[in-house]
């Protein structure tokens, strides 16, 4: 598993880790029942706190992407690919909602917001 974290990002490290593990699962690079690196191993490899890795694993388990077996480790759970994609879509919608609220708070109209999105999609 190849994880790249950006320490200068506004996105918390545990969320970056979660997103990359989710992407690996959805892309099929991590298969059902495949073990993830132990918390201690991954924290050492990434040079981050074990608590950060544990938090990411716990959140992934809450969302149904992994399952942790005490004393054995954390494994990719049997995931419904459609459900996984829907969870990611909801996350994008939530991000858009925040951006739209920010844009409205500085006085941009709906049309101006659409223009910005159209410009971004053309790039």
Image (spheres, grey):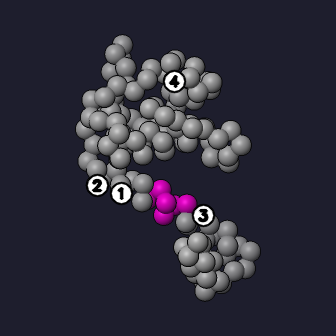
- Circles 4 and 3: CB atoms closer than 8 Å: no
Q: Earlier in the sequence, mark 4 or mark 1?
A: 4
Indicate the secondary structure of the residue bearing disc 4. helix
- For the point 74% across and 74% down, which residue is it? 106
Q: Earlier in the sequence, mark 4 or mark 3?
A: 4
| Mark 1 residue crowding within 10 angstroms, few (<14) / some (14–19) / many (20+) | few
Q: Nearer the viewer, mark 4 or mark 3?
A: 4
- For the point 35% across and 39% down, which residue is it? 29
Q: Earlier in the sequence, mark 3 or mark 2?
A: 2
**Alpha-carbon distance for marks 3 and 1?**
18 Å
Instruction: Report x, y in % for residue 32.
Output: 26, 34
Q: Earlier in the sequence, mark 3 or mark 1?
A: 1
Among the 4 quarters of the image, the one containing residue 36 = top left
Task: Report the front residue among 24 and 103.
Answer: 24
**Alpha-carbon distance for marks 4 and 1?**
27 Å
Could one spot residue 117 in this view of the protein?
no
Indicate the secondary structure of the residue bearing disc 2. helix
Q: Is residue 48 left or right of residue 32?
A: right
Q: Is residue 65 left or right of residue 11?
A: left
Indicate the secondary structure of the residue bearing disc 1. helix
Q: Which residues are magenta?
A: 90-95
Q: Earlier in the sequence, mark 2 or mark 4?
A: 4
Task: Report the front residue among 9 and 28.
Answer: 28
| Membership of 92 in magenta stretch | yes
Circle 2 residue: 82
Circle 3 residue: 98
Circle 4 residue: 42
Q: Nearer the viewer, mark 3 or mark 1?
A: 1
Placement of the C terminus among the 4 image quadrants? bottom right
In the image, residue 14 above or below residue 80: above
């Amino acid at each position: 598993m190849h994880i790249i974290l950006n320490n200068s990002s506004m996105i918390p490290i545990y969320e970056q880790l979660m997103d990359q593990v989710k992407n690996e699962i959805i892309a099929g690079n991590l298969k059902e029942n495949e073990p993830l690196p132990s918390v201690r191993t991954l924290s050492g490899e990434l040079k981050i706190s074990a608590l950060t890795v544990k938090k990411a694993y716990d959140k992934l388990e809450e969302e149904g992407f992994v399952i942790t077996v005490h004393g054995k480790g954390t494994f990719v759970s049997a995931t419904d690919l459609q459900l996984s994609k829907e969870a990611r879509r909801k996350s994008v919608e939530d991000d858009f909602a925040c951006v739209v609220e920010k844009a409205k708070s500085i006085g941009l109209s709906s049309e101006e917001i659409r223009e910005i999105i159209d410009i971004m999609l053309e790039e």
